[in-house]
Image (tube, helix red, strand yellow):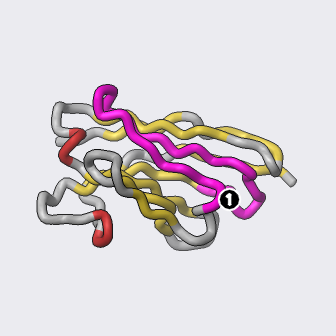
Amino acid sequence: QVQLVESGGGLVQAGGSLRLSCASSGRTFSRFHMGWFRQAPGKEREFVAAISRSGSGTVAADSVKDRFTISRDNGKNTVYLQMNSLKPEDRAVYYCAADANVYSTISNYSPDYWGQGTQVTVSS
């Protein structure tokens, strides 16, 4: 069983920055494509960004790709989401997720495991 624990959420003013972290249990972290999703109040969960097992490949939603950066440290079993130039519409619960399918690529990233989420609030 894989456990994912997010941290780093909070309240920030528009234009500010936050860095989210997601720590994974176990010794198989480097085998997973990792990513972030978010869910705003009254909306469906949406994809934010994903990173390949080695960290060499990333993808991001158009709404964030110029402001958010995903990265990982396989030695620390941790994936990060650096969020800059935050906007009120970025307010959401952010979830870390792991794709454990050995046949997955970053292009068809499909999570199998989810964290509990961390709240990000952006004031205008």
Where is residue 2? Give x, y as percent. Answer: 22, 41
The residue at 81%/49% (across/down) is 15
Question: Among all residues in the image, which is located at the extreme left?
Answer: 102
Where is residue 46? Give x, y as percent. Answer: 50, 68
Where is residue 47? Give x, y as percent. Answer: 47, 66
The residue at 23%/39% (across/down) is 29
In the rendered image, the vertical position of residue 2 relative to residue 98, given as above or below: above
Where is residue 40? Give x, y as percent. Answer: 61, 63
In the rendered image, the vertical position of residue 21 relative to residue 33, given as above or below: above
In the rendered image, the vertical position of residue 76 relative to residue 4, given as above or below: above
Label 1, residues with CA under 10 Å away: few <14, some 14-19, many ≥20: many
Asked whether residue 24 is drawn in magenta, I would say no
Q: Which image quadrant is residue 52 in?
A: bottom left
- Please identify the quadrant where the N terminus is shown: top left
Q: Which image quadrant is residue 104 in?
A: bottom left
- Please identify the quadrant where the C terminus is shown: bottom right
The residue at 59%/53% (across/down) is 68
Please state if 32 lies on the left or on the right of 23 as rendered: left
The residue at 68%/56% (across/down) is 91
Disc 1 residue type (three-letter): Asp
Highlighted magenta segment, given as a residue range: 66-92
Residue corresponding to mark 1: 90
Question: Among all residues in the image, which is located at the extreme top?
Answer: 76
Residue nearest the viewer, comparing 90 with 55: 55
Residue nearest the viewer, comparing 57 with 116: 57
Please state if 23 lies on the left or on the right of 80 as rendered: left
Please state if 46 lies on the left or on the right of 85 as rendered: left
Q: Secondary structure beneath disc 1?
A: helix
Residue nearest the viewer, comparing 49 with 117: 49
